[in-house]
Amino acid sequence: MLTSMITAFSTLAILTSQSLAAATFQTRALRGGVDVDEACRVQYGGNYRALKLGDYCDGWKCDVDGRHRGINMDMYCVSKYGGDALAKCADGWFSGVFNWECHDRT
């Protein structure tokens, strides 16, 4: 009985924290979308291009001559919109690679 109560409270705490995190992003102002090709060029130089390797938000890599590197979406948003910008994959992590957005941090 005690174990099931602890499990229920733990589940409630996780769901509450996820809801609060989602609500925080919903109140942040949208700055614009993420140009993933541009993000690759900004981070690694003009020869890099975006390569879609998966269907979820982490499906992007920067590629040049078959060499893949990760993309820092926050870095792109800061370079494009200023120091208070951050990246968010809209509608959740599994929503798709084309859902990246830049928001403000306030």
Image (cartoon, rainbow, N blue to C red):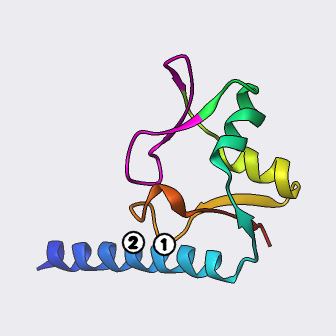
Q: Residue 50, percent across and down? A: 58, 38
At label 1, the amino acid type is Asp
Instruction: Kindly indicate the quadrant of the structure image that contains residue 45.
Output: top right
Give the Cα separation between the discs numbered 1 and 2.
Answer: 18 Å
Query: Can you name the residue that lies furthest to the right here?
Result: 82
Indicate whether 25 appears above or below 45. below
Q: Is residue 51 magenta?
A: yes
Q: How would you rate the neighbour count of disc 2 (Cα within 10 Å): few for under 14, some for 14-19, many for 20 or more? A: few
Q: Is residue 68 above or below residue 59?
A: above
Which range of residues does the magenta coloring cover?
Answer: 50-68
Determine whether the residue tagged by mark 1 lies in a helix, strand or loop.
loop
Q: Residue at x 74, y 44 (%)?
A: 75
Name the residue type under label 2.
Answer: Ile
User: In this view of the protein, which residue sits in the foreground, 47 or 11?
Assistant: 47
Mark 1 lies on residue: 91
Identify residue for label 2.
14
Question: In the rendered structure, which disc, 1 or 2, sits on the residue that comes first in sequence?
Answer: 2
Q: Nearer the viewer, mark 1 or mark 2?
A: 1
Percent coordinates x, y for residue 76 in the rendering: 74, 47
Q: Quadrant of the C terminus?
A: bottom right
Residue 16 drawn above or below residue 39: below
Dot 2: element: helix
